[in-house]
Structure formats: structure tokens, C-alpha cells
Amino acid sequence: MEEVKEKIDEKNMVNKVGLVEAGQSKEEVEQLQQKNSDEALIESEREKTDHPRGWDSNILKKMDIKVWSYLEEYEKEKDEIHSAIKNVLESGVLILGDHVKRFEDKFSNYCGCKYGIGVKNGTDALFLSLKALDIGPGDEVICVANTAVPTVAAITATGATTKFVDINPETCLMNIFKLKDAITEKTKCILPVHLYGQCVDMDKVKEMADEFGLKIVEDCAQAHGATYKGRKAGSMSDVATFSFYPSKVLGTFGDGGMVVTNNETLYERIKGLRMYGMRRKYFSIESGYNSRLDELHAAILLKKFAHLDEYIRKRQEIARRYGKLLTDTSLILPKTAENNTQVYYVYVCHHPKRDEIIAKLKERGILLNISYEWPIHIMDGYKYLGYKEGDLPHTEASCKNVFSLPMYPELSYEKQQKVCDALHDVLREIE
């Protein structure tokens, strides 16, 4: 250990002199010194360990790797973010000002839509969209049960009933061949969820909607920038919704949401519904809600929007590396559906010993996630819908085995390598 300390002290002294001469701040010097310490400790462990992959598990324990983190990204962009916040606070306008309007225009245009309406969150975006389509009590909306709860919560909030269809087990997306059997005289809308970062087969969805006179609402909360046959998620329906929750492909530092559409009538109605049903100041033409994207989050999102394609490129590169590093394991890796470009909101794998894998990686300081562990149709909160275990076999099987590996744009190559090395080791232990 004394040898390691000498290496660290020597390297830090050289770097400190160099940095001070270069005019770097004290904080920057300290950050590099810590980096040198970590690198020297790891190098020492690599040299002395008999571990087949060159890593000692005690070192991994000290270096937690989260399934998602915004901190590295924030560190790179904080000057832009702070400037955006300062501009809003000094503008004198905090609600529905120029930043919201500019972000609505930029993001809707990016999606291939004419109109955008900034709202409080992704759940409200779904709820307001369904309300604008006059969906309510007595109506049925077709969806999947392996989505996040907010999708179904939004349907329920309108008074409508969710009708579930099973998934394609290879992609975890809505099985479009099950749609026809789910349609009844009460069905009013199909709500495809572009889960994990790729799109449902929207041509088939549209064919079914046209045949039965149904509306389509795309849930794009996990698919900013994803494409199907060259068309962006959000551009293939009557109305589409996005979330800007912090972990999303495009996320803010809090909550935010967006509705996009090419229908001017829907645009005007949703714009009114988000503001108490008002079309002019202090005069409601229908009962509405309070669901506005505020200026602060819009300003932050404008700054981050400029990096969206870069975020996507980095996610895709991380996914490619996972595919290469884990191809020879027993993990079932994500499959890209035909005609799709994935943006990898999450990188999901399947394995029958999922829980054991998650527990063992946690011991090594690597935190994974499950998206999602319980299908909605068997949750206590939705028992009233009348489903039971066994009704959606592919959905239920996926939820028992699915889990997510670390995925975010600033995930370093070194951290990703540690995750994959640990997975190889754990899989050897349990198989």
C-alpha cells in the first residue's frame, strides 16, 4: 500500500504544479488529485489480483455505478443551465412566456408536428390528450400492461376503462396482431406505448384504427427522437405525448411534459384545457385544469434540446458496446424491431435469475433497475378491471425476467466495462 501512496503523491505533485502554472482553480486541482488516487488504487489492484478479469470486488464496492445519473452531464452543461435560469429570473415572466413558446415550437418541429403544448408532466399530457378527444366514462382505451403506471393512471383519470393486449415477447412492444380481438363497440382509442426507446408498428396500428374508426394517442415518454420507417415518434397519430422527467432521453431538473399534434382543433383545445379551459384571460369556455410547463423548465429544456441528438448518439454507442461485450452470455439482450431506430431510454435484458443477478451486482457496487417488475393488470390498484394472472402470458413472463443495465449519455467506457466484467463473473457463479 505504501508503494501505491508514493505513486499517488508523486503524480499529484506533478499535476498540481502543472495545473497551477496553467492557471487552473484549486477545485480543479483537487478533482484531478482524487482521479489520480482512484486510478493508482485500481492499477495496484489489477497488478496484484488473481481475479480472471483483473478487478478486485472490494474496489468495485467503493465505486458505486448507478443505473442512471445526471451529475456528469450537469457538470458539463451547468454554465448553460445556470445562464438559462438566470435569464428567466431576470425576465420578469415566469409562466407561459417566450421560453415555453420557443421550446414548444422547436420540439414539435423536431417531432414532425405543427403544434406543441407544454404541460406539467407526461401523465397530464396523456390525460389532457384523451380529454380533448372526448374520451371518458363508458369508453375503452387499448394499451399494454408492461408500461409505467402513469399511462394507465391517465386513462383511468378520464373515467375510461383500459383494455389490455399482450406484447410481442421479442421486443416487449404491443402485439399488434392482438388488437382486433380487443376491440369492442366501446373502444374509442388505441394507445401504443413506444417502450424502452423504440416504436410500435404504427402502420399496423393505423390500419386497425382506420378500419374501426378509432383515435390514436402515442405515448412517447421513453422515445424522444426514435423513428419508425424514418418518421419520428409522435408524428404518427392524432396526438402524441412526451415526458421530460429527469431520467428521460430529454429531461429537465424536475417535471415537464409536452403534447404534439398536427390537428389545429386539438391543439387549441388542449392549450385551453391546460389553463382552466380558458381561451382568453380569466374566461373559461369549459372546465379545465392547471397543467403548465413553467418558464424555468422550458428554458432548461431549450438548452438541453440543443444536445438531444448527441444524447441519442451516445446512448446508441453505449448500447452497441453492451451488445459486443455481452453477446457471449446467457442474457437475452434487447432486440430492435423491424423498421425502427432505437434511442435506448433504458437498456433492458432478460434472465430467469434476474433477482440473483441484481443482488450480486449490488454487492459489487453496481445498481440495476427493473422496468417494470409488476404488470399493471395484476396490481391491486387495477383489480377492478377484471384481469387475473395468466391473462397476458408474454407480458407476465417479461416482467418476471426483465431488468435494466446502467444507461445514460455520460456513462464512461470504464464504468460500462466494469458492469460487463461483473456480469460475466456473476453469470459464471450462478449458472
Image (cartoon, grey):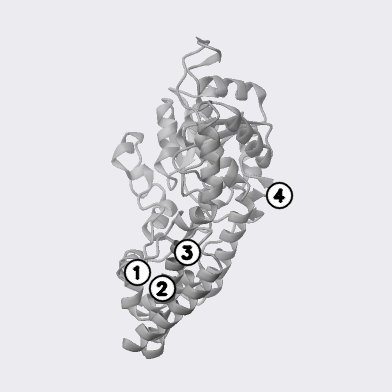
Task: Assess whether mark 3 and mark 1 are in contact (beta carbons under 8 angstroms).
Answer: no
Distance from label 3 to label 4 (Cα)?
Answer: 44 Å
Label annotation for residue 28: 3
- Which element is circle 2 on? helix
Amino acid residing under circle 2 = Leu
- Tell me the crowding category of disc 1: few under 14, some 14 to 19, or many 20 or more residues within 10 angstroms, Cα based: many
- Mark 2 vs mark 3: which is more N-terminal? 3
- Mark 4 vs mark 2: which is more N-terminal? 4
Instruction: Say which residue label 1 marks.
Output: 361
Instruction: Name the residue: 31% across, 70% down.
Output: 360
Percent of width and height locating residue 10 = 43, 83
Observer-side mark, 1 or 3, equals 3
Instruction: Say which residue label 2 marks.
Output: 423
Amino acid residing under circle 4 = Gly
**Residue 352, quarter of the rendered image:** bottom left
Which quadrant is home to the N terminus?
A: bottom left
- Tell me the crowding category of disc 2: few under 14, some 14 to 19, or many 20 or more residues within 10 angstroms, Cα based: many
Residue 408 drawn above or below residue 137: below
Which quadrant is home to the C terminus?
A: bottom left
- Mark 1 vs mark 3: which is more N-terminal? 3
Label annotation for residue 230: 4
- Mark 1 vs mark 4: which is more N-terminal? 4
Residue 322 appears in the picture as rendered: yes
**Residue 113, quarter of the rendered image:** top right
- Mark 1 vs mark 2: which is more N-terminal? 1
Q: In the image shown, does 409 or 399 lie closer to the viewer?
A: 409
Amino acid residing under circle 1 = Leu
